[in-house]
Structure formats: structure tokens, C-alpha cells
């Protein structure tokens, strides 16, 4: 009805506004971070000045992470849903996170292939895979593996992101998706919230299986788009 429509229009508008604000903030943030690095290189700094600069740097990184988890691919225009090859989205995320993975000696194994389409917004779906792969990399202290594979379940596709990181307890699994719940020093606790929100809006499912000391599997199930 009319009231509900207004409500969803409002939610959409807030999303678009947040995206454009994030874009505007990214540039000045990068500039300030750059100058902070330069200042930190000054050899005549007192201990107090240096520790202030460390604090500025760490808070800037936090602000950057919030934008990254929440809106890295967001566009400040209406969210358009299109028919897209989900493997293309996965490949793109693997490309983007490769360097980050290498840095932590994590091997990314992409076993997806073929041409399977879902109806989704490209930026949003990219954000989902990005946040889950990034969490996987961060769960592996060093020398680990992330495998991405898939299977077809009738009219659905399931994509699995499997890491052999530190895993989660049942309690930790139950807290996934709660805003600002994070076990990381510079964590936002927004990454999983965004994933659940987007997958729900696509009438899909996001399932988790995890074992402490063994690893975690995130499974994304989405309806396939017909021809
Ligand atoms: P953040 O990454 O900023 O902490 P997220 O919402 O992405 O926020 O994740 C919330 C929490 O869920 C993380 O702090 C971590 O404790 C846990 N988590 C998420 N993914 C994994 C994973 N693959 N392995 C282990 N723990 C995870
Ligand atoms: Mg995260």
C-alpha cells in the first residue's frame, strides 16, 4: 500500500545518500592519510607528537574500513537490479582481493566456472563476496587457503566460500550480522550485516558452518534467473 511504498522509498533514498556521502569522504580521507604518513616520517618529532600521529592514523584507518565494508562499490544512484553472470562477480572479487590475500600468504582457489545468471545489483553482490572473502583472509593468521566453489540445486545456485582459518564458536556464529559486533581491533562489525541485508533482499539464503580451529564455510544460495 501507499504507506509501505513511502517507507521503502525512504529507505532507498537513505541508501543512495549514504553512498554519495561515502564517495565524497573517500578523497579527503586519502589526502589526510597521505599527509599523516609524511608527518610520521619527520625525524624531529617528540615521542608525544609521534604517538598522537599514530592515533590519528589508526582512527583514519577505522573510518576507511567502515566505508570499505559498507559502501566500497556503492553508487550514488538508484540500485538497479540486472541479470548478471554470478561467476563474473566472483572472478572480479578474486582479482580485487588477490593482493590482500598474498600479503597474508593466503592462497585463493577459485573453482567456479560456467555461465549462471542471477537477478541482482552488481555493486551489492560484489560487496557481499568481498566482505566474506576479506573475513576469510582475516581469519587465517598465516598460510591458509580460501576455496570458492559452487553447485546447482535445482533452480538455485549455491556458492561456498571455504576458509581454513580460526573458525567461530556457536555463540560467535549467532552474533554474526549484529551491527558493530566485531572481534577485531579495527573491525566495524558492519560487513556481515551488509551481507545478510543484501542476500535477504534477493530472496536468497546465507548459511554458515564453522568449527573452531578448523575453519568456516559461508554458503550463499540465490535463485537462478531464467532465460
Ligand atoms: P569485522 O570484519 O569488521 O569484524 P564483520 O561483520 O565482517 O565485521 O564480522 C563480524 C565478526 O564475525 C568478525 O569480527 C569475526 O569475529 C567473525 N567472523 C566473520 N567471518 C569469519 C570467518 N570467516 N572466520 C572466523 N570469524 C569470522
Ligand atoms: Mg569484515
Image: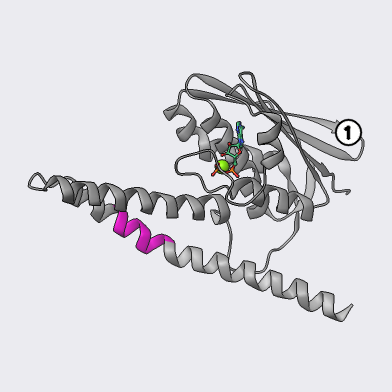
Query: Which of the 4 quarters of the picture holds residue 164?
Result: top right
Q: Nearer the viewer, residue 161 or 94?
A: 161
Ligand 2 is found in the corner quadrant, namely: top right
Tell me if residue 167 comes above or below residue 90 in the rendering.
above
> In the image, what residue occupies the spot 72% across and 48% down?
196
> In the image, what residue occupies the spot 67% across and 46% down?
177
Residue at numbered disc 1:
153
Magenta span of residues: 26-33
Residue extending farthest bottom: 2
Residue 20 visible within the image? yes
Residue 33: percent from left, percent from top: 31, 54
> In the image, what residue occupies the spot 45% across and 34% down?
99
User: Left or right of 217: which side holds 223?
Assistant: right
> In the image, what residue occupies the spot 45% across and 44% down?
186
Dominant secondary structure of the residues highlighted in magenta in the image: helix
Query: Which of the 4 quarters of the picture holds residue 134?
Result: top right
Tell me if residue 20 comes above or below residue 118 in the rendering.
below
User: Left or right of 45: which side holds 127?
Assistant: right
Residue 218 magenta: no
User: Left or right of 115: which side holds 102?
Assistant: left
Residue extending farthest left: 44
Residue 29 magenta: yes
Residue 29: percent from left, percent from top: 37, 59
- Quadrant where the image shows the N terminus: bottom right
Residue 139: percent from left, percent from top: 55, 29
Q: Nearer the viewer, residue 162 or 154?
A: 162
Amino acid at each position: 500500500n501507499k504507506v509501505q511504498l513511502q517507507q521503502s522509498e525512504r529507505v532507498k533514498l537513505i541508501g543512495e545518500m549514504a553512498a554519495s556521502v561515502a564517495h565524497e569522504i573517500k578523497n579527503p580521507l586519502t589526502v589526510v592519510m597521505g599527509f599523516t604518513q609524511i608527518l610520521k616520517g619527520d625525524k624531529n618529532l617528540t615521542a608525544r607528537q609521534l604517538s598522537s600521529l599514530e592515533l590519528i592514523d589508526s582512527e583514519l584507518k577505522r573510518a576507511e574500513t567502515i566505508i570499505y565494508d559498507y559502501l566500497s562499490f556503492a553508487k550514488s544512484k538508484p540500485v538497479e537490479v540486472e541479470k548478471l553472470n554470478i561467476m563474473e562477480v566472483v572472478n572480479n572479487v578474486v582479482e580485487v582481493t588477490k593482493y590482500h590475500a598474498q600479503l597474508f600468504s593466503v592462497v585463493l582457489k577459485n573453482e567456479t566456472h560456467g555461465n549462471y545468471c542471477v537477478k541482482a545489483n552488481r555493486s551489492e553482490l560484489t560487496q557481499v563476496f568481498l566482505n566474506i572473502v576479506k573475513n576469510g583472509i582475516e581469519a587465517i593468521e598465516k598460510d591458509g587457503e580460501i576455496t570458492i566453489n559452487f553447485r546447482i540445486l535445482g533452480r538455485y545456485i549455491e556458492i561456498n566460500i571455504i576458509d581454513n582459518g580460526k573458525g567461530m564458536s556457536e555463540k560467535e556464529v549467532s552474533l554474526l550480522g549484529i551491527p558493530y559486533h566485531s572481534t577485531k581491533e579495527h573491525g566495524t562489525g558492519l560487513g556481515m550485516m551488509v551481507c545478510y541485508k543484501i542476500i535477504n533482499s534477493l530472496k536468497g539464503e546465507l548459511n554458515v558452518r564453522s568449527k573452531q580451529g578448523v575453519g568456516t564455510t559461508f554458503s550463499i544460495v540465490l535463485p537462478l534467473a531464467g532465460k
